[in-house]
Amino acid sequence: MNAIISATAHYAPKKVLTNHDLEKIMDTTDEWIKSRTGIHQRHIIGENEATSDICTHIGRDLLEKANLKPDDIDIIIVSTVTPDMLAPSTAAIVQNNLGANRAWGFDLSAACSGFLYGLETGAKFVESGQYKRVMVIGVDAMSTILDYEDRNTSVLFGDGGGGVILESTESDFGILDSILRMDGSGGKYLQMPAGGSRMPATIETVENKMHYLKQDGRTVFKFAVKGMADVSAKMLEKHQLTGDDIALFIPHQANKRIIDAAANRCNISKDKVLINIQKYGNTTAGTIAIGLNEAVEQGRLKEGDYLLLAAFGAGWTWGSMLIKWGNPS
Ligand code: ACO
């Protein structure tokens, strides 16, 4: 039994923050951001919006596209590092918003690799034969943990997400393989120090801006290029494929230069690489899921195509996934 993607959806909040908007609030330029990252703009949530609201848009869209009722969903997995709150889970809020009364679920924390970890987890439930339909959402509202006085980090991120319905199939289409990795020794290079049990919120933690994301950008860059390229190349090698066999490569969208380096290493030509970082920035667990839905909407995937996904993020966490695209039957 394989797990197959039967529907895709994405949602980006209406509010757009351009590089020119950022020029007005910090010492940066549109030219610097575009040339160093490839980002032109990002979407951010409005005052009364939160991560679960993005998920609810995605969830409703998924149900409609898959022609399912809320009660058809068995499990909801929300991959995010920006949940509405620490408890209850965002998945529980989404379950209630959708009226998915038979579903159980949970949040999954793997930063920028969250959607890949979520797909792998969801696929295993479906492949077990015990569950028929799993909704997997990758989403983040990064604007809620950014210090807009820190130009090194804040210009890179945006809010948004996407999701899929996973169903079982006896055909040879669907998720073929994944290689997932984790190396916690990299945690110190990209983290939000306060707000958990190690450093609960106090007046001091707030005053010292410890509830914002902090990173050593150059180190992250170096590890991201190597991690994403290595694991993608390994996946191709394992299945005796070359870059030419891949119809579409959807890498995590952190920096256009990281994407280009990973694609070059795997000899995947530019026209087969999905890049939308210019519109959304880095939406953390959202990037690959957004890209996947855009690819479907643009007709970039046809039955039998090999689709390669790759991610790298805080943790460190990273991985790649090989999918043979097709309709469930
Ligand atoms: N505007 C203008 N200047 C800036 C800005 C900005 N927004 N940010 C940094 N600079 C300056 C720096 O202060 C530095 O100035 P200095 O030389 O006077 O000290 C100069 O630009 C060059 O800085 P570098 O760090 O060398 O710039 P680099 O080309 O490495 O780009 C960047 C920095 C964009 C952060 C890059 O290292 C990167 O993308 N790293 C990966 C970070 C990342 O993706 N994190 C997301 C989470 S992890 C993931 O998703 C994979």
Image: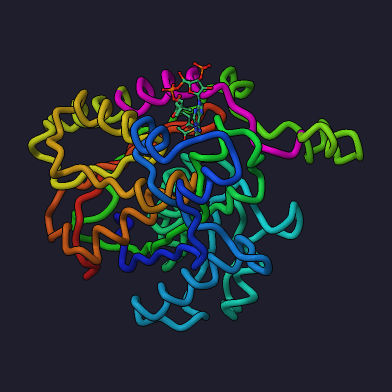
Q: Residue at x 43, y 68 (%)?
A: 133
Q: Is residue 123 left or right of residue 155?
A: left
Examine the image and state in which quarter residue 253 appears: top left
Q: Which of the 4 quarters of the picture holds residue 151?
A: top right
Q: How many marks?
A: 0
Against 29, residue 274 (above or below) is below
Which x, y percent locates residue 146? Answer: 64, 42
Horizontal placement of 111 versus 282: left or right? right
Reply above or below: 308 against 230.
Answer: below
| Residue at the limit of the structure toward the front, as seen here | 24
Closest to the observer, 109 or 19:
19
Asked if the magenta segment contains residue 187, the reply would be no
Q: Position of residue 25 (x, y in %)?
A: 60, 44
Colour mode of the rendering = rainbow
At 82% from the left and 36% from the top, the residue drawn is: 197
Q: Residue at x 66, y 40 (%)?
A: 147
Residue pushed farthest left?
A: 244
Using the image, determine if residue 266 lies above or below residue 111: above
Identify the magenta region.
Answer: 210-229
Q: Nearer the viewer, residue 152 or 13?
A: 152
Q: Position of residue 159 (x, y in %)?
A: 52, 54
Would you say 5 lies left or right of 144 here?
left
Nearest the viewer among 134 and 205 is 205
Please, is residue 221 above or below residue 320 in the view? above
Q: In the rendering, at what x and y percent does residue 177 appear? A: 30, 41
**On the rendered image, what quadrant is the N terminus found in?**
bottom left
Helix, strand or loop for the magenta stretch, by majority:
helix
**Residue at 90% across / 39% down in the picture?**
202
Give the residue at the far right of this rendering.
Answer: 203
* Quadrant of the rendering where the C terminus is positioned: bottom left
